[in-house]
Amino acid sequence: MKIKSVETFVLSDKLEKSFYFSQWSYSERKICLVKVTTDDGQVGWGEGYGPADVLSAGVDFLEQFVVGMNPLNNEAIWYTLYRRTLDYARRGILMASVSAIDVAIWDLKGKILGLPVHQLLGGKQRDIIYPYATGLYFREERDLTQALVEEALEYKSLGYKSLKMKVGMSIEDDIRFVGEVRKAIGDDIKLMIDANHAYNLKEAIYLSNAIEDLDIAWFEEPISPEFYDQHAELRASTSIPIAGGECEYLRWGFHNLLKNNSLDILQPDICASGGLTEAKRIATLATTYGVELVPHSWGTYVAISAAVHFIANLEAIPGRLVMPEFTMEHDRTVNGLRDLVTLPSFEVKDGKLIIPDTPGLGVEINEEALEKYRVK
Ligand SMILES: [Mg+2]
């Protein structure tokens, strides 16, 4: 059996109402899905994280190295792609293209063997994941504080046990928004904040000290991902766990974060940092430092399902009789591409996700919607 083709699908959907965070505003959702087909007509789907047009160009370039290879040999394929990109792109978008192909190959391998991806990774170590709701972005509202409080209460009423909100527009607003949301949701819901590296070290220390008594489960990307050692300084000055890594790539990049004691929680994006093949290695590396890992995840149910299968297989370090509950990022922002094009084989109900055993990633693609939203 051989790989016959690697196709890209760039999809776009204009948003009725834009939303923003500390770096830029979203007025459309745009993603790149990847379809790998074998000579006997079997198909796997992948997705990359990053600008869809550039990602798609990267996948088109890489197709020539993958065609003719056996899809069961995912590590051999991964290494071929890694070697072909190393000289030009040790970090960044070309690695997201590699990741998209890698994720598609895991899906394909699972379908060929009739096994779920979590079993190919080594087997599931739990049956349930407790996803956290990612939302609470900024938008034009007459009363943004009230709108954020209402959104947070909606997630709580849906059963989510933890929520993540954006910060990073101004420290004064952050303190007010986070304080009001905490007051509204009560003490029994975990609350995380994400600055998308909006602050310098002094600002990040100031903010974390100001909200330290609000029981923040983690402060994500407080400062620039370039400053490995400044993260360690921040960690030493606050009791709030520091998370990050969605802008990092490959095991060597994550090793920089680990050996600099930068983070309490590593957040590789499976669809950017090297695919499931490399994410498994990053997870193993994290256990050698005793650092927790919760992948970053943003996109359709292809990307989200890759995270589900990956988290199913993660080791808990340290182990104990009553194991910790594993969480997962569940993006709740408006995304028609996610909801109409990709159909997952799980649902999130009462804050729980039962890990599915369907072969591959278990995502069905709605071909009609795929064509409707396809721009390239
Ligand atoms: Mg983030």
Image: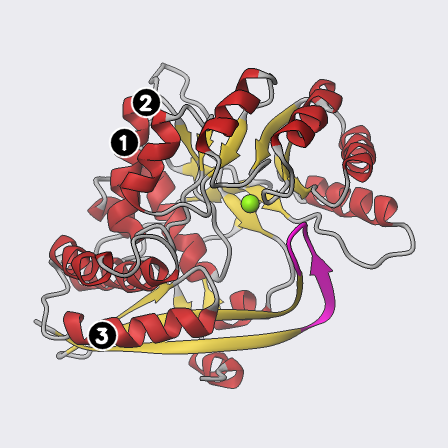
Asked whether, in this view, residue 207 is left or right of residue 317, the answer is right
> Which residue type carries mark 2?
Tyr
Q: Tell me the element at label 2.
A: helix
Query: What scheme was used to colour the molecule?
Result: secondary structure
Q: Position of residue 354 (x, y in %)?
A: 44, 43
Q: Position of residue 82 (x, y in %)?
A: 21, 57
Mark 3 touches mark 2? (CB < 8 Å): no
Quarter of the image containing the N terminus?
bottom left
Q: Earlier in the sequence, mark 1 or mark 3?
A: 3
Task: Residue 209: tell me if it is visible.
Answer: yes
Compute the Cα span from label 1 to label 3: 29 Å
Report which residue position mark 3 lands on. 63
Q: Earlier in the sequence, mark 3 or mark 2?
A: 3
Q: Is mark 3 within 8 Å of ligand 1?
A: no
Mark 3 Cα-neighbour bin, 10 Å: few <14, some 14–19, many ≥20: some
Which image quarter has ligand 1?
A: top right
Task: Choose between 192 and 227: the one closer to the eye.
Answer: 227
> Which residue type carries mark 3?
Glu
> Which residue type carries mark 1?
Leu
- Report the residue at 36% width, 15% height from top: 320
Asked whether, in this view, residue 287 is left or right of residue 374, the answer is left
Boundaries of the magenta span: 15-24
The number of discs equals 3
- Report the residue at 59% width, 42% height from top: 197
Mark 2 Cα-neighbour bin, 10 Å: few <14, some 14–19, many ≥20: few
Compute the Cα span from label 3 to label 2: 36 Å
Q: Position of residue 23 (x, y in %)?
A: 64, 53
Q: Tell me the element at label 3.
A: helix
Report which residue position mark 1 lands on. 285
Q: Position of residue 233 (x, y in %)?
A: 53, 21
Report which residue position mark 2 lands on. 289
- Report the residue at 70% width, 20% height from top: 209
